Image (cartoon, grey):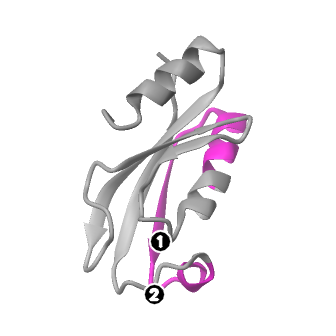
Amino acid sequence: MRDILPTVEKWQANGEDIAVATVVKAMGSSPRQLGAKMAVTRSGDMVGSVSGGCVEGAVFEEAQKVLKTRQPKLVRYGVADDLAWEVGLACGGSIEVFIEPLDW
């Protein structure tokens, strides 16, 4: 979180609505470790990474849904999922990402 914190604090000061995505499980080969974070604003800004770039677009879309519903969600991406190839996760593993609205 330290790597994205300055940007998140700036967004908060500007009144942005923010969601945070965190890698909570990684199986097999994955480009980012547990705890990797990415933050997304409702207005479309993004900072950090949960996959080294290969699923960020899909996580961004899920984060927008979380911001609308205010309901956290757990999403899984892996090579066994049809969606994984579409979003570029071809590294041979899978990750689970928890996405939640930032309410602090």
Tell me: residue 71, above or below residue 63. above
Residue 10 pos. (x, y %)? 54, 20
Which residue was labeled with disc 1?
77
Q: Quadrant of residue 92?
A: bottom left
Q: How crowded is mark 1: few (under 14 residues within 10 Å), some or many (20 or more)?
A: many
Residue 87 pos. (x, y %)? 59, 75
Q: Is residue 82 on the magenta stretch?
A: yes
Q: Which residue is drawn at 47% across and 16% down?
A: 104
Q: Is residue 17 on the magenta stretch?
A: no
Q: Which amino acid does label 1 sit on?
A: Tyr
Q: Residue furthest top?
A: 13
The one nearer the camera, 100 or 29, is: 29
Image: magenta residue range = 62-86
Gap between marks 1 and 2 measured at Cα: 8 Å
Tell me: residue 36, above or below residue 5. below
Q: Quadrant of residue 85?
A: bottom right
SS category of the residue bearing label 1: strand
Count numbered badges in the picture. 2
Q: How crowded is mark 2: few (under 14 residues within 10 Å), some or many (20 or more)?
A: few
Position of residue 83 in the picture relative to residue 29 (left or right): right
Q: Which residue is drawn at 27% across and 79% down?
A: 29
Q: Which mark is residue 80?
A: 2
Tell me: residue 89, above or below residue 18. below
Q: Which residue is drawn at 60% across and 79% down?
A: 83
Q: In which quarter of the image is residue 50?
A: bottom left
Q: Quadrant of the N terminus?
A: top left
Asked if labels 2 and 1 touch by Cβ distance under 8 angstroms, the answer is no
Q: Which residue is drawn at 58% across and 44% down?
A: 46
Residue 98 pos. (x, y %)? 43, 49
The one nearer the camera, 74 or 92, is: 92
